[in-house]
Image (tube, coloured by chain):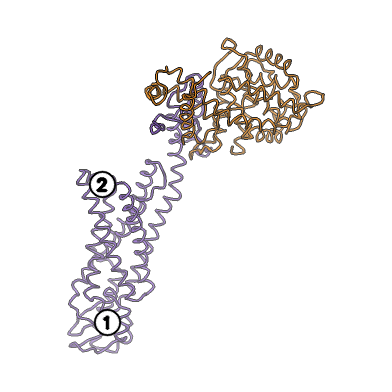
Chain colours: A orange, B purple
Amino acid sequence: MIINESDKQKATAFIQRLMANPALKSFSLLQREEQIIQFLTVNSRQLYPTLSSQAFFPGKSWDSICAILVSVLYELTDNEVLPDIRLLINRLDFTFFTFLRPSNLDEGQAKQVVMDFLQKMLANEQARRIFTGSLAAVNYNIVKKYTAEIYRRKKYIHFELLKVEKLKMGEREVENMINLVMLLKPMIYLFSQQANVMKNTANGNIFPCSFTETLAKNLSAKAQAVPPQVFSSSMNANASFADNSKLEASARLGNVFSAMCRNYKPDTKKDRGADTAMKSWINVARKNYKFYGYDIKMLDELYNIAADNGW
Amino acid sequence: MDRKNYQVLENIVLAAIFFVLVQTFVEDLAIVAGWSWDVRRILILTGLGFDLFFTIEFLTRLYRAIARGSVREYIVLRRGWIDLLASVPLLLLSSGPSAIAVLMGGGAITGAAGILNVLKVVKAVRIARILRLLRVLKIFKQIKNTDSAMAQRHISKITTMGVAVFVGILLFASIFVQMLGLPTAASENEKIISEVMIAYETNPDLAESCSDLLIVKKSGETVFTRYDNDFYKMNFGFNDYVYAEYMGWEFFFDIRGVEKVQSMDNLLFFVIILALVLAYTLFYSPHFAITVSDPIHVMRRGLEEKSYNFEVKINPEYAGDDIFKLAENYNNIYLPLKDRTQAEDLPDADSLELKFDDIKNMF
């Protein structure tokens, strides 16, 4: 979208002031972006008279104004979030690739492929929204916390990861794999249309397995630096366990963790008398597992982990 | 008056309540410990200062309530009756007469007995001192140990009932004991004094053996004194002795022992009331919060705020309580339903943290 310099300056000033609003202080960059977009949508009637005045964007329709503001918002967010993502990808250890595929690992190339995918993905609005949860889960080391407990307990999830999915790798490698699965999960929105969607939910759309599996194969063919299992899990993290009980455990976990962190705020102060944010979220997910396509046994174990650790 | 100044005044009142409790305790402690009259005299005058302060506070609050047409609300609901009982009667019946006695030289045992009428009044209404214990409620009234108005009301109601019933029983018991002429430490002491006075005429040597007899005078001349005048001046206040006449003899008896017993009782009552209030505040208040107001608060927020999705924490110990059965339904039925509804609905203003009011100053 081409925006003239004057409009861009005004839009930047307006968006920067919105982003600096104390009400959004506790949100991550992408969560903040989502709040602002929703704010613009919900308050369009009140905002339009002011934003279409001489001081802002005179003579423009609300759709045009909104498009300018959202475009600037994306740019401002990307300026901050992309370096963070690059840093995060560089920090991720891709040695688990060697456990999935017996070949020499070119980690630099693999990381570049992933980064390119993520950059493309961030141009898609729906993907950005789902990526909010994935990024938060990786940033806040949620997977690390839970995998440590999963490995210590050696119960259902451990069995599913090691015996069923046959991830013959250590705790640290599994953690990195799930993190990467979550980061790549929203890529599905680059290739999907509403017609492909089985169900729309706030935590992301649910796609049929036939679609996710085909897409995974296509991606694997395009980017051979990344093992096909990673793409398969990433895409299947958008499918429902009710639809396919053979979904990879890493896909099921990636789906749960990225949804859990969609609105996660680590500094949220819980009221006295309330349960923790994670325990509350998991318990609600347990009740709605069919709706979201989660694996109930996995949620039960995650709930027990959260309860036992006071998370 | 703006809110800031009002808050400053409320804080001054709160500090005054704290200090008057300390003063009340120290005043009785001074009697039990046998502190010098100079110190006790200061404490009596300080008590007058506090009673004056609280009387002014009560009258100001009452005036405001009258001006706003909310006298009933102030007296009944905002517990103005405590303000009343812990101020005006104390000023008129306790600290006021005591201070007058002190200022008129009532402390001087060797002085003229012209102020004896005042002293009699002071002694007769000592029962009113019990009302000072109600001040513990005043400090409790000011402390808001929980955010929930319901919790505050319940805790303050049960505390007020506990303390008021205790003070009321003490007050009425004292009145009944006096009305029925039942034996007390003071009445027993009076009996002994009468016996000593009757026996003294036939046996003056009795003065030495009766340790409570301080001075005997005949026609204005001192015929017996146990201590010198400096000692009396230093250790005896108007409440510490009784003056009596019999067959032309004037007697001064030491009643500090009886005073000590009464002060010991006062200290005990004071400690009991403090313990009651602390027990309600430290133990019952958190229990009430955990089992009643906190789960309600969490459920109310969950119902009111779209983005509030915390579950109520259910303590297995209280899981059978109606409130936690309700909370279980809230956790297992309402929250999942709310989540599913939100998953399918478009966001609205209520579900956002950023409100339109937050940005009004931007334009």
Q: Quadrant of residue B96?
A: bottom left
Q: Which element is circle 1 on? A: helix
Percent of width and height locating residue A286: 58, 26
Q: Residue at x 67, y 23 (%)?
A: A116
Q: Residue under circle 1?
A: B196
Report whether residue A93 is seen: yes
Q: Is residue B275 above or below residue B236?
A: above
Disc 1: which chain?
B
Q: Position of residue B202 (x, y in %)?
A: 24, 88
Mark 2 Cα within 10 Å, few/some/many (few <14, many 20+)?
A: some
Left of B150 or right of it: where is A1? right
Amino acid type, residue under disc 1 in the picture: Val
Label 1 vs label 2, nearer the camera? 2
Structural crowding at the residue carrying mark 1, measured as other residues with C-alpha within 10 Å and reported as few (<14), some (14–19) or many (≥20) = some
The residue type indicated by label 2 comes to: Tyr
State the residue in front, A25 or B151.
A25
Could you tell me which residue is drawn at 22 percent across and 62 percent down?
A: B92
Q: Is residue B305 above or below residue B206?
A: above
Residue A281: quadrant of the picture: top right
Which quadrant, please, contains the C terminus of chain B? Answer: top left
- Front residue of this view, candidates B349 and B186: B349
On the image, the x and y values in percent for residue B361 come to 38, 34
Marks 1/2: CA distance? 54 Å
